[in-house]
Amino acid sequence: MARHANLSIFKDKAGMETLSIFEVDREVQEDNPKNFELDPRDKTSREKEEPTESVVLDEAEPDKTVKIGARLTEQVKKDKRRSFNLERSAAIKEEVSKLLAARSIREVKYPEWVANVVLVKKKNNQWRMYVDFTDLNKACPKDSFLLPRIDQLVDATAGHETLSFMDAYSGYNQIKMHKPDEEKTAFTTDQGLYCYTVMPFGLKNAGATYQRLVNKMFARQIGRNMEVYVDDMLTKSITAGRHTDDLRETFDVLVRYGMKLNPAKCVFGVPSGRFIGYQVHQRGIEVNPEKI
């Protein structure tokens, strides 16, 4: 099949004659008596013009690939989904089920950002699932809200007879994500695509956001009968007789804001204990015996 086109001839500034196709008015049938158009899916010419590169979809099956534009920047290219063995896949599935039941995540479609999950072995040989927000964090501005100085917090506990150590239960997850930003936390698993409805661990400004929250919550107590470093909280009393009142004040704030504690990591009414990695007591600090 050939097309009959009207052509015009004009001269450019250099005086060279050029052909210009300005209209295609009819089709001319040649060998095939029926009207025929080239298949628009024919990609032979496109591949010659646009360089591509192959990306393996599954490392276990390297023959399964997909082509993407070779000129894409690293920021635009999406990470391929990581593959996990049966043990790790089961751990991811279990964690996703827990997060869905707690309504900490929800299913999402067509997210702008998609991250992979990472598994880390805990001391009890259980797997902990994190989301690799490396690319998202690079695109986020830094929150310059300062965390407290650890040495000052530890020194502030010296001279107090009775201490109570508290830890928030999945503290970061107790802060709601800004609704329009939920889908930016999307991650991929074998079960599907999900995003967080609460603040996940691993975001660039999660620590600063949490510290700002607890500073406002315990503004009347910090420095007087309480010290807080992100989700580590300590209520302190000069004498044992005052500790009940100091704890009551702390729990009133916790109830008012709906913050939940992790009982397994809380210790109440003791002369010493671990705070931010240090063993603190009335006389000051000492080396954590578990680190010796």
Image (tube, helix red, strand yellow):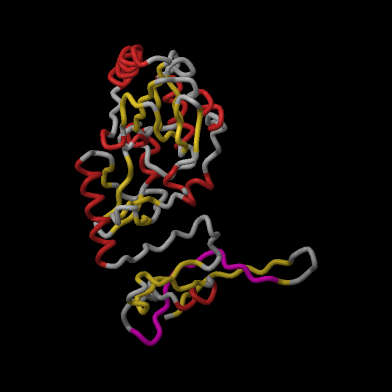
* Rendering coords of residue 31 (x, y %): 38, 87
State the image coordinates of residue 98 (x, y, percent, origin top left).
22, 46
Q: Residue at x 44, y 13 (%)?
A: 220
Q: Which residue is the extreme one toward the front?
A: 283
- Quadrant of image for the N terminus: bottom left
Q: Nearer the viewer, residue 209 or 112?
A: 209
In the displayed structure image, the side of residue 94 where residue 39 appears, left or right:
right
Total tally of numbered discs in the picture: 0
Q: Going by the picture, which residue comes out furthest to the bottom?
A: 31
Q: Residue at x 53, y 29 (%)?
A: 148
Residue shown at 44% from the left, 59% from the top: 78
- Residue 59 lies, with reference to residue 165, above or below; the image says below
**Which corner quadrant of the image does residue 80 belong to?**
bottom left
Please name whichever residue, 170 or 290, is drawn nearer the observer in this view of the structure.
290
Q: Main secondary structure of the magenta part?
A: strand
Q: Which residues are magenta?
A: 18-32
Q: Is residue 14 above or below residue 48?
A: above
Residue 140 belongs to the span the image colors magenta: no
At horizontal 50% and vertical 46% (from top left) the residue drawn is: 137
32 or 131, which lies in front?
Answer: 131
Q: Is residue 103 left or right of residue 234?
A: left
Please name whichever residue, 252 or 27, is drawn nearer the observer in this view of the structure.
252
